Amino acid sequence: MRRPRWTRALPAVAACAVLAGCGIRPTGIISAGTGPAAQAHADTITVYLVRGHRLLPVTRPGLPGQPNLAIGQLTVPPTGQERAIGLRTEVHGPLDAYKVVNMTGPVGHHPQMVVRSAGRRNVPKNWSRIAKAQIACTAQAIPGIQSVNLLSALNATETSLETLTCDQFADLLE
């Protein structure tokens, strides 16, 4: 004789009911102290903008945990106040920037910034001298950065890596 399907399922339902009452009793809300509070402090960042054919450092508010923000700010249009004194940027299009440590030198480790045009990486990019100066000086204003490696696409298959320092553009500084 064959049992109905629901009677075969009865032992499984009974086992689930037993396991559901595992002995843990509900409690009320238990206090665990005060809630979290954000206490990060954002330093200002220095961005080099262009007035005429010279570079001028300006400060802008930074963001905690965003050490490379200054590089990204090069592509942000100047504020109304900055435009009023004739400032502009020669860096157009988004940039990728990241810090690396050069460990090939004979003495110590030298932190460097690698900067490249973001987005389509195979598009040739010819940086003007003033744009290179903006990138180099802004990067070196970031604490700990000693030089910049500017990565440029020469064509669809070749890239160029140029090491820059702000000293190379001393004639452009105001």
Image (cartoon, rainbow, N blue to C red):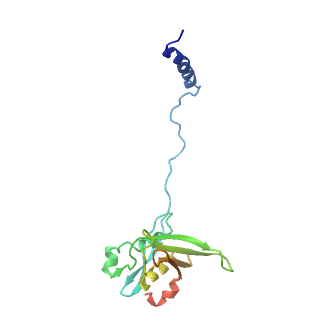
* Residue at (44% x, 88% y) in the render: 172
List x then y, in percent, for residue 162.
52, 81
- The quadrant of the rendering that contains the N terminus is top right
List x then y, in percent, for residue 127.
43, 81
* Residue at (50% x, 58% y) in the render: 39
Residue at the extreme bottom: 171
Residue at the extreme top: 1
Relative to 144, residue 20 above or below: above
Q: Is residue 59 left or right of residue 22?
A: left
* Residue at (48% x, 77% y) in the render: 152
- Asked whether 120 or 116 is in front, the reply is 120
Total labels drawn: 0
Res 21 → quadrant: top right
Q: Is residue 16 left or right of residue 49?
A: right
Q: Is residue 168 left or right of residue 107?
A: left
Residue at the extreme right: 106
- The quadrant of the rendering that contains the C terminus is bottom left
* Residue at (38% x, 82% y) in the render: 50
